Image (cartoon, helix red, strand yellow):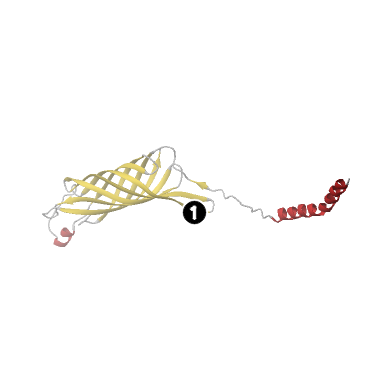
Amino acid sequence: MENWFRSIFLAVALMPVAELAAQSDEEDSGNLIEPEIERVEFDESKIDSQDFEITAYVGFLAIENFNTDIVVGIKFGYHISEDFFVRASYGTADAGETSFEKLSGGAPLLSEDERQLEYYLVSLGYNLLPGEAFLTDATTYNTVFYLTGGVGTTTFAGEDRFTIEYGVGYKVLFADSFSIDVEMRNLVFDMDLFGSVESTNNLEFTVGLNLFF
């Protein structure tokens, strides 16, 4: 009997302690801060599932010892993977007078047909720094900084000249199927217009419109 009374006494004595603990838990739950995170929805352009790309471009070609002239061309590319692509290029420009012709005032060194420059190049490209460009809070565009290098043939001054090409470019993907890129390349080939063979550096700066299919 004594043990029974002791049990009842302990239960009654501990009831206020249990109520205080429950009240403390409720207060702690009420003090928790629930952050309100608002997700910003935006339209992000992505390259289409197709791996082929065709580009029409225009720009300037600075032919060494000649003027800087307008160049136009076309590129056809295939994306091997997310990082690598291969590309074939064709471009043409009309060279002006050489610095020697301007200074001497003598007979022209080249005919009109020989002043037309054409090149055919095959290049390997590497997407070095993919990123994003934000136009507004709700619109973003994928971008990529890439490197290219390749070989080909340049027809100029009546001869076909082996050409080494290397360059850099920056591409902005405005929609799933097209993008715009800015590219600078150096076309290196030998010329012997002045009696000795010299390796020339011919800088090209172009802006192109790319279509994926």
Query: Which residue is nearer to you in this view: 13 or 146?
Result: 13
Query: Which residue is nearer to you in this view: 118 or 38?
Result: 38
Q: Position of residue 4 (x, y in %)?
A: 86, 46
For the N terminus, the quadrant is: top right
Residue 24 image-quadrant placement: bottom right
Q: Which residue is mark 1?
A: 135
Q: Position of residue 32 (x, y in %)?
A: 68, 55
For the C terminus, the quadrant is: top left
Give above or below for 128 relative to 106.
above
Three-letter code, disc 1: Leu
Q: Is 60 on the left or on the right of 30, as rendered?
A: left
**In the rendered image, is residue 98 in sight?**
yes
Residue lying at the far left of the rendered structure: 195
Q: Position of residue 111 (x, y in %)?
A: 16, 49
Query: Which residue is nearer to you in this view: 206 or 33?
Result: 33
Q: Is 46 on the left or on the right of 88, as rendered?
A: right
Q: Is 96 on the left or on the right of 11, as rendered?
A: left
**In the rendered image, is residue 62 in sight?**
no
Residue lying at the far bottom of the rendered structure: 103
Residue lying at the far right of the rendered structure: 1
Q: Position of residue 165 (x, y in %)?
A: 26, 48
What is the crowding at mark 1: few (fewer than 14 residues within 10 Å), some, or many (at least 20)? few
Query: Which residue is nearer to you in this view: 211 or 162?
Result: 162
Name the residue rendered at 30%, 45% in the picture. 73
